[in-house]
Amino acid sequence: MKVPYCRIACDGNELAYVREVLASGWLTTGAKALELERRFAEVVQAGHAIAANSCTSALHLALEALGVKAGDEVFVPTMTFTASAEVIRYMNAHPVFLDVEYGTSLLTPGIVREAIREHPGVKTLVVVHYGGQAAPLFGRGGEQGILEICRQHGIRVVEDAAHAFPTKLGDAMVGSIGDVTCFSFYANKTITTGEGGMLTTNDAAIAARARTMRLHGIDRVVWDRFTSAKPGWEYDVVAPGFKYNMPDINAAIGLAQLERAWDFQRERLRCAKHYLRDLAGAPHLDLPVSHGPVEDQAWHLFPVVLTPGAPVGRDRCIEMLAEKGIGTSVHYRPLHRMSYYRDTYHLKPEDFPQAERIWSGCFSLPIFPTLGDDELSYVCGVLRDILEGRE
Ligand SMILES: Cc1ncc(COP(=O)(O)O)c(C=O)c1O
């Protein structure tokens, strides 16, 4: 049997909606992108949604709109994709890398509190909803949440929700909680536009700035220039903006994907439950820990950690799975181990003990909506054989 790491599901209305765009004669940002923004805002219960051409560009727009300045420091977890931190460098600001919690790979209120004590000047935090589980922004059982701690210290919270659509935290949808939230619609994400992203916020000023900077710092949208009664040529440039808009061709794919977002989430949850059941108690294997109901998570990833004493190391385990036709990935080699960040900021592995513990054994199993129960059972069987020394 062959089980790929990822299989993309674009067999709904994607083609029909893209055809509409091609037939309309308007290929760049227009009616479809506006429609995607409107519908996405509705689903995540956000005041404003701004479509971008990637999550990376949405994160850049977020930091720019928040007024992050050259020389500022910004908190970011080490267990993430480089995009979460590189956008801080785009602003000529500096990332302050934080360790994460073993089991969830998330920031915790304790980690954030400690970081504020050590770096009292930091005014922005990028929090990552690793794997599709929301970080503890709200407090639990008398303990303050990350959001409350940040509010008390005047720290703005940018949520990197590249993995987290649709994800709930208590009664709230991720996208309606922090100051700004950024989603990814990259090809292998929980919904895709090929390449794309979305910024959501409840702050009208942040939304207005992000909208302007998304398209060259022009003070009106190009779509509006062609549809409104005002002369089409007339616009002002109010800042040196970026070219981060989402074309309608991509938005059309996104609209078809959005129609099935909850179906996709249900199927990913089915996969996660299958793994949690079949791999429970497997020797030398730590399964992902959930703070809240598993039903609330997007399940973009199913990360596991091979623990010391396993019959084979992580790299050999990945090879053995590949020999049996099973695709895997690794999320992540932490950023403090990437040469650019390590050398620029003189980072040492011993300063990130939990991320190191995760990194030494972590890999991600296939999880996608069309992954069959027979395929899931096969993956679990092969992995158990490896862990129990039968391979
Ligand atoms: C945590 C995280 N943040 C940001 C991104 C960047 O997303 P995009 O490729 O849409 O720019 C990714 C992409 O994989 C990611 O995993």
Image (cartoon, helix red, strand yellow):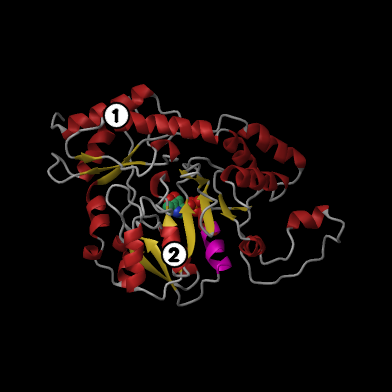
Residue at the (49%, 68%) spot, across then down: 90
Q: Residue furthest front?
A: 142
Residue drawn 22% across the image and 51% down it: 360
Q: Residues within 10 Å of mark 1 (few under 14, many from 20)?
A: few
Residue 267, quarter of picture: top left
Q: What residue is disc 1 on?
A: 277
Magenta span: helix, strand or loop, mainly? helix
Q: Is residue 63 magenta?
A: yes
Mark earlier in primary sequence (2, 1): 2
Which amino acid, mark 1? Arg
Cα separation between marks 2 and 1: 37 Å
For the C terminus, the quadrant is: top left
Q: Nearer the viewer, mark 2 or mark 1?
A: 2
In the rendering, at what x and y percent does residue 152 appear? 45, 67
For the residue pair 120 and 200, the one nearer the viewer reads as 120
Q: Does dot 2 land on a helix, a strand or a loop?
A: helix
Q: Which mark is residue 150?
A: 2
Where 69 sits versus 172, above or below? below
The image's mark for residue 299 is none
Residue 160 magenta-highlighted: no
Res. 140 visible in picture = yes
Left or right of 96 in this view: 174: right
Tell me the magenta residue range: 58-66
